[in-house]
Image: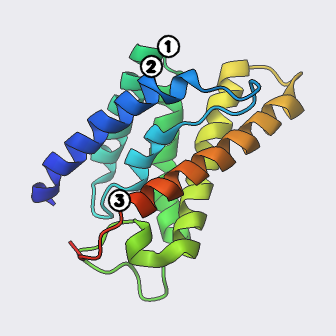
Amino acid sequence: MIKLIPRYLINFIILVLVQVFVLNNIQLGGFVNPYLYVLFILILPFEIPSWLLLFVAFFLGMSIDLFSSTIGMHTSATVFMAFLRPYVLKLISPRDGYESETLPQLKYYGGAWFIRYSAILIFAHHLFLFYIEVFRLSSFFTTFVRVVLSSLFTIFLVLISQYFFRRDRRK
């Protein structure tokens, strides 16, 4: 896992920069806001300790908040997503468990598993983020439409990125 640290550091920087300089400027009708930076939490190794996962999620969310001037909204949503991740992994685990030396990525566990995994966590992240942003129930259905559309678009971007960076080697 230590040999993966430089790769994850580069992924972190690239995802934050793409989110801040490209994707934060995309709003399709005010209803679709893509948040590709959540991919970083999705692809972290299975063996990452819970405390480190939460710390990394906090740092990732704080980085997005600093550039977006959103004062803790992304931080709280990303920590919430990281908190749910071990439970979701346990819920959708294969019958034999996860193989050692693999990562929670499309190339290791296939499309159906990865779509379920990413869809649950991305939807939870977006649900938390958008309702914290609005912070009222008077626009419940409008916010829910935003959550669904943004989640679908983010899942689409995550899947494209998984196919784009797919390699056939196992480590």
Q: Given contact means CB atoms under 8 Å apart, are the residues at marks 3 and 2 in contact?
A: no
Q: Residue at x 52, y 30 (%)?
A: 23
Q: Secondary structure at mark 3?
A: loop
The circle on residue 65 is: 2
Outermost residue toward the bottom in this view: 96
Q: Is residue 56 found left or right of 125 in the rendered image?
A: left
Q: CA distance from mark 3 to mark 1?
A: 32 Å
Q: Quadrant of residue 45?
A: bottom left
| Residue at the far front in the pictured view | 164
Query: Residue at the spot x=62%, y=31% of the render?
Result: 129
Q: CA distance from mark 3 to mark 2?
A: 27 Å
Sequence order check: which comes first, mark 1 or mark 2? Answer: 2
- The quarter holding residue 44 reads bottom left
How packed is label 3: few (under 14 Cα within 10 Å), some, or many (20 or more)? few
Residues at marks 1 and 2 touching, judged by CB atoms closer than 8 Å: yes
Task: Quarter of the image for the N terminus: give it.
Answer: bottom left
Q: CA distance from mark 1 to mark 2?
A: 6 Å
Classify 159 as above or below 9.
below
Disc 3 marks a residue whose amino acid type is Phe
Nearest the eye: 170 or 87: 170
**What is the three-letter code of the residue carrying label 1?**
Ile
Residue 93 visible (yes or no): no
Q: Nearest the camera: 152 or 117? A: 152
Please give the label number shown on residue 71: 1
Residue 165 image label? 3
Helix, strand or loop under label 2:
helix
Which of discs 3 and 1 lies nearer the camera? The answer is 3
Query: Crowding at label 2, few (<14), some or many (≥20) Cα neighbours within 10 Å?
Result: some
Residue 4: x percent and y percent? 16, 56
Asked which colour scheme the image uses, the reply is rainbow
Q: Position of residue 161 (x, y in %)?
A: 44, 54
Instruction: State the image coordinates of residue 15 (x, y, percent, origin top left).
Output: 37, 37
